[in-house]
Image (cartoon, rainbow, N blue to C red):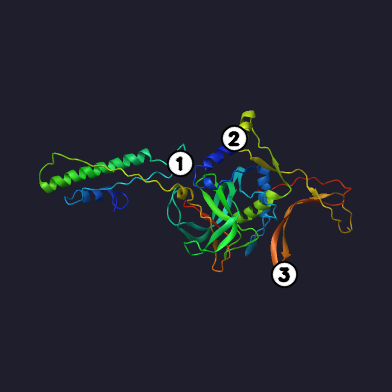
């Protein structure tokens, strides 16, 4: 399950505020599907802000959840951060949405028509 | 559109995932030439059950390494869409799964068409997701919209037949593709230098895209050598017979048929003046 894909912000908060909610959470940011000026793929500023916002909500919810569980205000918080970058294989990236194969019927006759990439 | 405009369009295309397939050879299709090709396409009967594509030799195909055709003035073209990517992948995504869709006619504002290199292409049986091992010799084609993310891919199967799906007509884009491959090699097509604003632009084009030429219509028409049949009333003029498609019977006992394009030619008594009333293209 993921925040904003499967859960709304309120649902996420409701779940994260529970004392038994895990302390470890992975947030994933994927680059916007538009070429930048240089033609390279990059993360958008809005996406990064959204990601840090999600992390902030998660930390806030964990503080409240822990407070409720222990019935004492926590006085120290440490956050470990591991960044992991992934890039698709360039060849696969290049050979994306262009299915270069003919569509045939059961008798293997090529069919008239085209393939349109996802709009 | 000048040489710099074509360079800009190519640079834009090179940012997309089809960049590796863009051939070096590029031609700018002038407005008149494009109208002529579209008029050829309009002349093709659409209520066909199958369409026979010419071989590379039949259309004097000179682009073995592929060619990118950029249209001086984009125009709307109807496509018959029969498959799509299975899920949202975006232009930089990886599309390995496709799905067939009920054939739908969709418009595209067309900026260019890219013909790839003729190759054995794997085929996919309608209704399946995976490519089969069967292969077909084909030239991949890519219709690129004015929005370069809008791409529609198809194939030209030289010497092969495409079957029009039941209840459908031959799509406008297929008729246009057929006309385009025919027109690229026919003798009324003339390659001329691309318009440029000045020497700087010419040098830039020469450096970055030396093969770039513009396609335009050659002036005048060829003269028919054939003797006309005896006329009851002798003609007072020679006239231009517009280019047209013929169904040519061929094969064993002439059981096969294919569409063949006939270039415009001049008909009538050679000693009579040419009737030069202008042909008005319907667009």
Circle 1 packing at 10 Å, graded few (<14), some (14-19), many (20+), is some
Q: Residue at x 72, y 65 (%)?
A: B250
Q: Residue at x 62, y 53 (%)?
A: B177
Look at discs 3 and 1 and give the one toward the viewer: 3
Q: CA distance from mark 2 to mark 1?
A: 21 Å
Residue A42 figure quarter: top left
Mark 2 lies on residue: B4
Q: Quadrant of the N terminus of chain B?
A: top right
Task: Say left or right for B165 vs A41.
Answer: right
Chain label for disc 1:
A
Q: Residue at x 30, y 53 (%)?
A: A6
Asked whether the viewer can see residue B198, the reply is no
Where residue A61 appears, as percent x and y from the top left, is 20, 45
Circle 2 packing at 10 Å, graded few (<14), some (14-19), many (20+), is some
Q: Element type at marker 1?
A: loop
On screen, residue B268 above or below B29: below
Mark 3 lies on residue: B252
Chain label for disc 3:
B
Marks 2, 3 in one chain: yes
Instruction: Out of B60 and B174, give the one closest to the viewer.
Output: B60
Q: Which mark is residue A35?
A: 1
Instruction: Out of A28 and B56, give the one closest to the viewer.
Output: B56
Q: CA distance from mark 3 to mark 1?
A: 54 Å
Q: CA distance from mark 2 to mark 3?
A: 52 Å
Where residue B85 appears, as percent x and y from the top left, is 46, 55
Where residue A8 appears, as percent x and y from the top left, is 28, 50
Where residue A65 appears, as percent x and y from the top left, is 17, 47
Instruction: Out of B178 and B172, give the one closest to the viewer.
Output: B178
Chain label for disc 2:
B
Asked whether the viewer can see residue B267, the reply is yes
Q: Element type at marker 3?
A: helix
């Amino acid at each position: 399950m993921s925040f904003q894909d499967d859960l709304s912000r309120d649902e996420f908060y409701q779940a994260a505020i529970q004392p038994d909610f895990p302390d470890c959470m992975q947030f994933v940011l994927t680059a916007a599907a538009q070429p930048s000026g240089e033609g390279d793929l990059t993360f958008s500023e809005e996406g990064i802000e959204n990601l840090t916002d999600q992390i902030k909500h998660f930390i806030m919810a964990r503080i409240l959840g822990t407070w409720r569980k222990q019935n004492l205000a926590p006085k120290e918080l440490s956050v470990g951060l591991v960044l992991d970058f992934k890039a698709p294989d360039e060849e696969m990236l290049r050979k994306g949405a262009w299915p270069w194969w003919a569509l045939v019927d059961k008798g293997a006759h090529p069919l008239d028509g085209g393939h349109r990439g996802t709009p | 559109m000048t040489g710099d405009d074509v360079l800009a369009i190519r640079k834009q295309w090179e940012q997309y995932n089809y960049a590796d397939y863009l051939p070096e050879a590029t031609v700018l299709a002038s407005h008149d030439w494009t109208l002529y090709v579209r008029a050829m396409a309009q002349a093709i009967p659409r209520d066909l059950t199958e369409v026979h594509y010419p071989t590379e030799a039949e259309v004097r195909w000179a682009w073995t390494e592929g060619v990118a055709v950029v249209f001086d003035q984009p125009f709307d073209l109807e496509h018959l869409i029969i498959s799509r990517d299975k899920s949202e992948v975006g232009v930089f995504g990886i599309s390995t799964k496709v799905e067939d869709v009920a054939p739908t006619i969709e418009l595209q504002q067309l900026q260019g068409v890219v013909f790839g290199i003729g190759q054995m292409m794997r085929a996919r049986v309608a209704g399946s997701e995976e490519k089969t091992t069967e292969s077909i010799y084909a030239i991949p084609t890519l219709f690129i919209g004015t929005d370069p993310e809008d791409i529609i891919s198809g194939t030209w199967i030289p010497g092969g037949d495409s079957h029009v799906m039941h209840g459908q007509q031959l799509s406008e884009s297929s008729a246009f593709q057929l006309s385009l491959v025919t027109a690229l090699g026919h003798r009324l097509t003339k390659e001329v230098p691309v318009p440029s604003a000045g020497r700087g632009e010419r040098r830039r084009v020469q450096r970055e895209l030396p093969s770039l030429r513009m396609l335009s219509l050659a002036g005048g028409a060829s003269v028919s050598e054939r003797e006309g049949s005896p006329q009851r009333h002798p003609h007072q003029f020679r006239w231009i017979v517009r280019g047209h498609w013929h169904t040519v019977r061929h094969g064993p006992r002439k059981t096969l048929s294919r569409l063949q394009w006939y270039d415009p030619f001049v008909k009538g008594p050679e000693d009579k003046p040419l009737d030069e009333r202008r042909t008005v293209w319907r667009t």
